Amino acid sequence: MTEKDHSLAEFQAALLNALDSHVNAAEIFQALRKNKAAEPFEEWIDQMNPAMIEIGAELVKKWGRK
């Protein structure tokens, strides 16, 4: 696994955790910004639509498994 792949995997885990742990977009964004694994992806996070994030959280809670 390359360093880039490892960074992406860490971010994906942080995103999944944030979506699973929080309901509203503001809390999810805040959790991501506090997570060091998300730092390389800040620009991408800033472009996320809050409604998309909340729908993602609903889907993770309904269908996701850890």
Image (tube, rainbow, N blue to C red):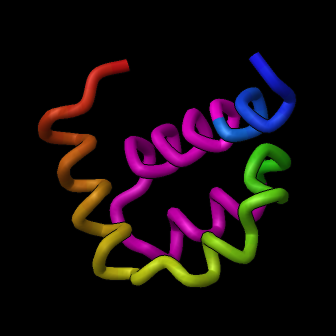
Q: Residue placed farthest to the left in the image? A: 62
Secondary structure predominantly adopted by residues drawn in magenta: helix
Q: Is residue 35 above or below residue 63?
A: below
Q: Is residue 16 above or below residue 55?
A: above
Q: Is residue 54 left or right of residue 6?
A: left
Instruction: Name the residue rendered at 31%, 73% in the picture.
Output: 52
On the image, the x and y values in percent for residue 40 come to 82, 57
Q: Quadrant of residue 58?
A: bottom left
Instruction: Name the residue rendered at 41%, 83% in the picture.
Output: 49
Q: How many marks?
A: 0
Quarter of the image containing the N terminus? top right
Q: Is residue 40 inside the magenta stretch? A: no
Q: Is residue 23 left or right of residue 31?
A: left
Read off the magenta span. Answer: 9-34
- Which of the pair 29/46 is nearer the observer? 46
Q: Is residue 32 above or below residue 50?
A: above
Instruction: Name the residue rendered at 86%, 29% in the picture.
Output: 3
On the image, the x and y values in percent for residue 43 come to 72, 76
On the image, the x and y values in percent for residue 11 come to 66, 43
Q: Is residue 33 inside the magenta stretch? A: yes
Q: Is residue 61 above or below residue 66?
A: below
Q: Is residue 55 left or right of residue 37?
A: left
Instruction: Name the residue rendered at 29%, 80% in the picture.
Output: 51
Q: Quadrant of residue 63?
A: top left
Q: Is residue 39 left or right of residue 21?
A: right
